[in-house]
Image (cartoon, rainbow, N blue to C red):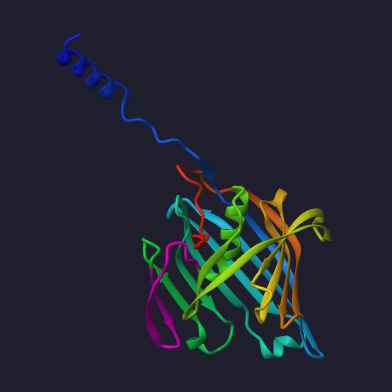
Amino acid sequence: MKPEKRNLILSLCCVFLGPAQAAIAAQVSLPLYTVAYTASYSFGILTFTADTDTSISWDDQSGEYLYNTRFEANGVASWKFPGIANDRGRFKLDCRGIVPVENLREDGSDKLEEDLVTHFDATGTKAKVLYRGENLEFDLLPGTVDPQLLSLAVMLDMQQGLPVGTYLALDRTKIKPYPFRAMGEETLDTRIGKYTTLVLQEGNDTDTRTRKVWVVPELGYLPVKIEYRKKGKTQAITTIDSLVRNGQGPQVDCEEPPSNAQPVTE
């Protein structure tokens, strides 16, 4: 076959077949739900409880996930924390992982300067924060989220069979690392049933503050119990009260499994 004719046939093949399709290595989406917890706090001889609930939903119009976390203190603690704190925002899920868009934090007090507004740019590498009357700007490493999205970042990795790692969050005016590691399995009786859980620890053994998180694989690795510790002593325990599952968000097809975990350095 003459070279000219062979090249013509190859060109026609490209026209009719189109470019080669990239292989899909990961198909991911996030669960939609409303979950309620009770938190019990201990400070010396003082103890109090608080109710907290979180919802994750999908907005077709904006093409974004919406989240809202509500916190309300009970009993005598409501004298010190009389208002209802709300933490809400918007984020996306794409082949980079969870990409925050906006976070609005109201602390429930009359001090409006304590409220927080954070806007993330589309690249996920810059953020603007309004806090205590100051406008602040931050350069972020890829994968950085706001603190309310940490649990979703961990859930996303575990749903894909990826190891948990260290995640970064812009918490008010500081970028903080949150290292997670697996600790094993534990069977747990909860108000929504008995489950075999995976136990994670956030923080290193030498850290002043750490927390243990019990997640349930069959619930998409949703946390059902969280224990907060300071200097080795338990300060708060959060346990699940109820769960309403509302399906899944849209599926995203990626060539590589998306993750917010920071790269491991040698």
Question: As drawn, is 216 to the left or to the right of 2?
Answer: right
Q: Is the magenta stretch mostly helix, strand or loop?
A: strand
Query: In the current view of this chain or complex, which residue is farthest to the front?
Result: 266
The residue at the point 39 percent across, 86 percent down is 134
Q: In this view, does 144 lie above or below 248?
A: below
**Quarter of the image where one finds residue 9:** top left
Q: In this view, does 115 lie above or below 147?
A: below
**Quarter of the image where one finds residue 73:** bottom right
Q: Is residue 84 above or below residue 251?
A: below
| Residue 64 coordinates in the image, percent (x, y) | 46, 56
Tell how many labels.
0
Quarter containing the N terminus: top left
| Residue 63 coordinates in the image, percent (x, y) | 44, 52
| Residue 159 coordinates in the image, percent (x, y) | 62, 49
In the rendered image, residue 140 lying in the magenta stretch gets the answer yes
The residue at the point 32 percent across, 30 percent down is 19
In the rendered image, residue 234 lying in the magenta stretch gets the answer no
| Residue 222 coordinates in the image, percent (x, y) | 68, 57
The residue at the point 42 percent across, 81 percent down is 130
From which residue to which does the magenta span run?
126-145
Query: In the current view of this chain or complex, which residue is farthest to the left?
Result: 4
Question: As drawn, is 135 to the left or to the right of 231?
Answer: left
The residue at the point 56 percent across, 56 percent down is 57
